[in-house]
Amino acid sequence: MLNISGVPERALVRVYDTVGRKVWVGAARQDLWQLDVSAWSRGTYVLRIEAHGVVHSFRFMLTE
């Protein structure tokens, strides 16, 4: 599980792999939420959060 906090409600959340393919898209429904990544391949991903005209990007790595 990927735990995410501090995200405004209804923020658009996207996750991309290292090739730039979109692997997940959704909307945050609360400040603290979890994204089940257990079926995803190991590797590096980019989490992109868009809210109120502002975009934040974060990289994370799955190792197991």
Image: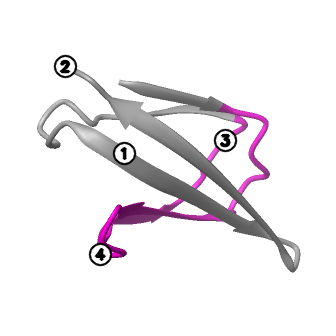
Disc 4 from disc 3: Cα separation: 26 Å
Residue 15 location, quadrant: bottom left
Evaluate if marks 1 and 4 touch, with contact meaning CB atoms under 8 Å apart: no
Q: Are marks 4 and 2 in contact (CB under 8 Å)?
A: no
First in sequence: mark 3 vs mark 2:
3
Work out whether mark 1 precedes mark 2 in sequence or the reverse, and give the earlier one. Answer: 1
Residue type, numbered disc 3: Gln
Q: Which residue is mark 2?
A: 64
Residue at left 27%, top 36%? 37
In three-dimensional space, the C-alpha distance between marks 4 and 2, rounded to whole angstroms, equals 21 Å
Q: Which residues are magenta?
A: 5-31
Amino acid residing under circle 4: Arg
- What's the residue at 27%, 41% (across, down)? 43
Residue at (19% x, 36% y) in the render: 42
Q: Hey, what amino acid is under mark 2?
A: Glu
**Element carrying mark 1:** strand
Q: Which residue is mark 3?
A: 30
Crowding near the residue tagged with mark 2, few <14, some 14–19, many ≥20 C-alpha atoms within 10 Å? few
Where is 25 relative to 38, above or below? below
Q: Residue furthest bottom?
A: 53
Foreground residue among 27 and 42: 42
- Where residue 61 appears, as percent x and y from the top left, is 39, 34
Q: Is residue 15 magenta?
A: yes
Type of the residue with mark 1:
Thr
Distance, label 3 to label 1, CA atoms, is 25 Å
Instruction: From the top left corner, tell me how far across and down residue 2 is, in percent.
Output: 44, 29
User: Could you tell me which secondary element the residue under label 2 belongs to?
Assistant: loop
Question: What numbered label is drawn on residue 44?
Answer: 1
Q: Earlier in the sequence, mark 3 or mark 1?
A: 3
Q: Is residue 59 left or right of residue 51?
A: left
Coordinates of residue 24 in the picture (x, y in percent): 33, 62
